[in-house]
Image (cartoon, rainbow, N blue to C red):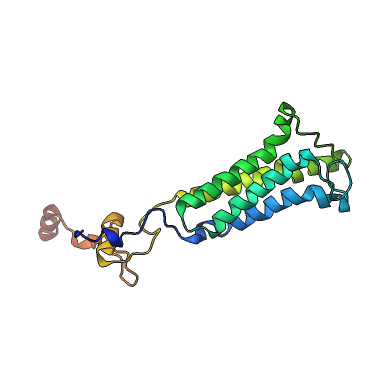
Amino acid sequence: MKRGTHAHRPSRFVMPRRRGAVAGPLIMLVGAWGALIPFFGHSFGFGYTPSNTWTWTTARGYLEVLPGIGAFLGGALLTISANRATATLGGWVAAASGSWFVLGTVVSPWWSGGNIGTPVGGTSQAVWERIGMFTGVGMVIVYLAALSLGRVSLSGPRAVPATSPEQLDALERIEGARTIPGDRPRTVDLTAAETDADKSERIQR
């Protein structure tokens, strides 16, 4: 590559926005559910005590609203960011928030954050309330965040558009084949690659 072409080289922190275009909004949606379900879930008999709709408690703030907001912000960063570092930060924030949904109620006795209450439904419904408000919400967020972090971490010659002929040549050397749209891939005619022994055998026949 000629000197003076480094200005045309795109930053490795640049990435397509589509990397987080699917998982990011889903994380935002699940995070919003986790933050709001303790307040409106009682309107259809789903939630933890106290069973009054839109009742604020310290435990709900620490164990549901806080991780819900964190997941929503992390998903927003994944959705709108075209910078690898910013999207990675969003992915880790979302993953940490999802982990807190799962582990928050387990470690909450370590500090005086208040009592989260008990499920208002029967034995069968209580299982779905635990899954739909804590464990299941957290696992979905962690899965989507991990998926996004994997996609964001991908860095290859196709991650950014080429901006100069020199860069196109560099991409071809890296990939081992031409990548210019419209060009046909290079192929090798194996039938023409005869060895001397093959030629001698054919002549004798």
**Image quarter in which the C terminus is found:** bottom left
Q: Could one spot residue 81 in this view of the protein?
A: yes
Find residue 8 and report its image quarter: bottom left
As drawn, the residue found furthest toward the bottom would be: 182
What x and y, as percent, mark residue 121?
A: 88, 42
What x and y, as percent, mark residue 29?
A: 68, 55
**In the image shown, does 186 or 80 lie closer to the viewer?**
80
Please state if 184 lies on the left or on the right of 77 as rendered: left
Which residue shows up at 46% across the image and 52% down it? 84
Please state if 1 lies on the left or on the right of 199 as rendered: right
Please state if 74 lies on the left or on the right of 1 as rendered: right
**Image quarter in which the N terminus is found:** bottom left
Which residue shows up at 81% across the image and 49% down it? 39
What x and y, as percent, mark residue 195?
A: 14, 54
What x and y, as percent, mark residue 36?
A: 76, 51
Is the residue 17 above or below the residue 116 in the image? Answer: below
Q: Could one spot residue 187 in this view of the protein?
A: no
Which residue shows up at 72% across the image and 28% down it? 111
Total count of labels: 0
Which residue shows up at 50% across the image and 60% down it? 17
Is the residue 33 above or below the residue 185 in the image? Answer: above
**In the image shown, does 171 or 12 lie closer to the viewer?**
12
As drawn, the residue found furthest toward the top would be: 110
